[in-house]
Amino acid sequence: MGKKLERLQRMLVIINKLKGLQRYVPREELENYVTHRMEERGGIPVDLRTLQRDFNAIEEMFGIRICFDKKRNGYYINEEDDTKKEQYERLLLNFDILNALDTSSDLHTYVVAEHHRPVNNEYLPLLIKAIKFSHPIIFKYMYVRENGKVREKEVLPHYLKEDQYRWYLLAYEENVLKTFSVDCVIDPQDIVWKNIQA
């Protein structure tokens, strides 16, 4: 795992933990949690100095400020500014995307993103898993040019492309490669996982 990717994953793990149900997270608990999650991904253990550097980087890069409350003896995300909440919601989407892939996966082989952060989309992790494991999916698809008409689709996802803040899914439908705007995809379901869980 490259150092930049490892650092990004570590920052997303930190944010994920601090955004959980537990409002204040003690230092040792946060340190152990991040270390455990990073070791699962082939990363190295972290210490307090590493966490503090990551806190600074998170604030510089994403505008998310992590504070320490001495009375409650725990770290927390400062949510004074509502716009910050939307920012780390997007970060958590990226965390879910990275979670959907193991450390041996080559994300760039089937996901092409622009340099800026894309608009949030809750379905990306499911679509990436379907591509990674070659699983067919079903979903309802809204045709904007047909006054919002909705049709059901069963496709084999092949590739994801992000362009101008929008995600597009390239998938085979009846052996024909087609492009679908992820914004128009409604309630996608992985057929294989659905059958396994049934």
Image (cartoon, rainbow, N blue to C red):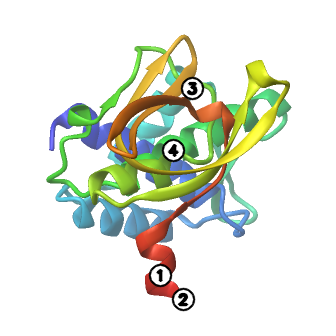
Residue type at tag 4: Leu
Could you say which is closer to the camera, residue 98 or residue 3?
98
Could you say which is closer to the camera, residue 34 or residue 178?
178
Q: Is residue 124 above or below residue 57?
A: below
Q: Which residue is mark 2?
A: 198
Q: Which residue is mark 4?
A: 124
Residue name at image x 38 percent, y 56 percent: 129
Whole-percent x and y of residue 122?
62, 46
Name the secondary structure under disc 1: helix
Measured Cα–Cα span from mark 2 to mark 4 = 23 Å
What label sits on residue 195 in the rendered view?
A: 1
Q: Please identify the quadrant where the N terminus is shown.
A: top left
Q: Is residue 51 above or below residue 54?
A: below
Residue 63, picture quadrant: top right
Name the secondary structure under disc 3: helix
Q: Are marks 1 and 2 in contact (CB under 8 Å)?
A: yes
Q: Earlier in the sequence, mark 3 or mark 2?
A: 3
Q: Earlier in the sequence, mark 1 or mark 4?
A: 4
In-image side of 25 versus 45 (left or right): right
In-image side of 42 versus 194 (left or right): left
Q: Are marks 4 and 3 in contact (CB under 8 Å)?
A: no
Q: Earlier in the sequence, mark 2 or mark 4?
A: 4
- The answer, for residue 78, to whether it is visible in the render is no
Residue type at tag 3: Phe
Name the secondary structure under disc 2: loop
Q: Are marks 3 and 1 in contact (CB under 8 Å)?
A: no
Q: Is residue 105 above or below residue 2?
A: below
Residue name at image x 47 percent, y 81 percent: 195
Residue name at image x 51 percent, y 76 percent: 194
